[in-house]
Amino acid sequence: MTKSDTAFKTIGEVSAALGVPQHVLRYWETRFPQLKPLTRAGNRRYYRPEDVALARHIQSLLGEQGYTVRGVQKLLADAPAPPTLTPTSAPAPEGGGAGANGHAATAPPAPSASAAPQPGSPASAAPDPLLDELRAIRDLLAGLLADEPSGASIS
């Protein structure tokens, strides 16, 4: 029997779904304040569908798109504020209400293509000085590598 897409999931279920170890999810919780699963007795974590979507988005940014943890932190911090769910719009695991840590059911920012510009995409509204600097360094390195005779090593 499989769970509904709207059901709360344990850390083990999210870990298996994303293909990342449980300790990585716990680490992400310390680095990304937007990722806050409900915690119950014994610090059992229950991930809302929004938490699972955010964890999947973080995994995509870190693993597939090449962002660093700091880069993902910046993207998530710059994202618009998440909407707050009313208690009737989000099912609560066993016992309902706020979690043992006192957090009410709130939704983290929903991952969307517009919230996170793709690396190298011209979609960014303002030029990023850090990105410009990195491109200049990349071009400099490409020029240096082109000048190197093949077989020579940089030491």
Image (spheres, rainbow, N blue to C red):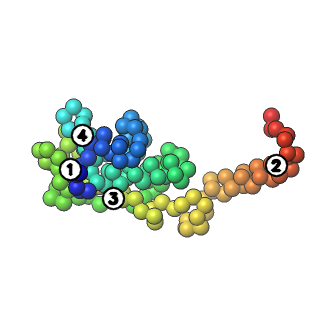
- Which residue is the extreme one toward the top? 42
Q: CA distance from mark 2 to mark 3?
A: 45 Å
Proximity of marks 1 and 2: CB atoms separated by less than 8 Å: no
Residue at the spot of label 2: 144
Compute the Cα span from label 3 to label 4.
Answer: 20 Å
Q: Which residue is mark 1?
A: 1
Q: Dot 2: few (<14), some (14–19), or many (≥20) neighbours within 10 Å?
A: few
Amino acid at the residue labelled 1: Met
State which tag comes first along the sequence, 3 or 4. Answer: 4
Q: Nearer the viewer, mark 3 or mark 4?
A: 4
C-alpha gap between disc 4 and disc 1: 24 Å
- SS under mark 3: loop
Q: Secondary structure at mark 2?
A: helix
Q: Secondary structure at mark 4?
A: strand
Horizontal arrangement in the rendering, residue 49 relative to residue 127 (left or right): left
Residue shown at the point (40%, 59%) measured from the top left: 111
Q: Is residue 55 above or below residue 153?
A: below
Which residue is depicted at the point 45% across and 57% down? 78
Q: Nearer the viewer, mark 2 or mark 3?
A: 2
Q: CA distance from mark 4 to mark 2?
A: 53 Å
Distance Cα–Cα, label 1 vs label 2? 58 Å
Of the two numbered discs 1 and 3 on the same chain, state the one appearing first in sequence: 1
Residue placed under numbered mark 4 in the picture: 39
N-term mark: 2 or 3? 3
Residue 126 in view of the camera: no
